[in-house]
Image: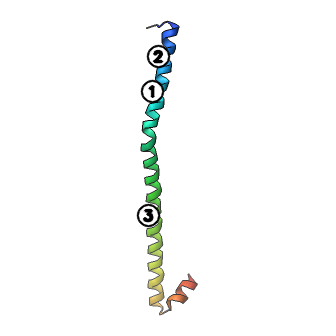
């Protein structure tokens, strides 16, 4: 269906505003997903560090080392 040029221009302008509103509605969801990913990475990093510390402590205990010596060696 063909629209007169003035009617078509008004419709395109309204749609541009609608796209901006939809983007503003989607932006918080995108931000929450991104921050959740960052938080998940931080939790995984902390778990890895805790595992490394536990292994170092177990190794120090098996070698009958002092905790200070084990920390210095690590």
Q: Position of residue 25 (x, y in %)?
A: 42, 37
Label 2–label 1 contact, CB within 8 A: no
Above or below: residue 27 compared with residue 61 = above
- Residue 11: give its label: 2
Label 1–label 3 contact, CB within 8 A: no
Q: Nearer the viewer, residue 19 or 37?
A: 19
| Residue at image coords 43%, 58% | 40
Quadrant that contains the N terminus: top left
Mark 1: which secondary structure?
helix
Q: Which residue is tagged 3?
A: 43
Q: Rate crowding at label 3 as few (under 14), some (14 to 19) or many (20 or more) other CA atoms within 10 Å.
A: few
Compare marks 2 and 3 and give the one earlier in the sequence.
2
Quadrant that contains the C terminus: bottom right
Above or below: residue 64 compared with residue 52 = below
62 with respect to 68 (left or right): left
Q: Position of residue 60 (x, y in %)?
A: 48, 87
| Residue at image coords 43%, 69% | 47
Mark 2: which secondary structure?
helix
| Residue at image coords 51%, 9% | 6
Mark 3: which secondary structure?
helix
Above or below: residue 6 compared with residue 54 = above
| Mark 1 vs mark 3: in front | 1
- Where is residue 62, by image quadrant? bottom left
Cα–Cα span, label 1 and label 3? 38 Å
Compare marks 2 and 1 and give the one earlier in the sequence.
2
| Residue at image coords 48%, 91% | 63
Cα–Cα span, label 2 and label 1? 11 Å
Q: Residue furthest right?
A: 72
Q: Which residue is tagged 1?
A: 18
Cα–Cα span, label 2 and label 3? 48 Å
């Amino acid at each position: 269906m063909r629209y007169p040029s003035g009617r078509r221009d008004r419709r395109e302008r309204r749609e541009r505003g609608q796209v901006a509103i939809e983007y503003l509605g989607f932006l918080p969801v995108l931000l929450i997903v991104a921050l959740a990913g960052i938080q998940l990475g931080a939790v995984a990093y902390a778990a890895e560090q805790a595992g490394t510390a536990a292994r170092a402590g177990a190794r120090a205990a098996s070698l009958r080392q002092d905790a200070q010596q084990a920390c210095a060696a690590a």
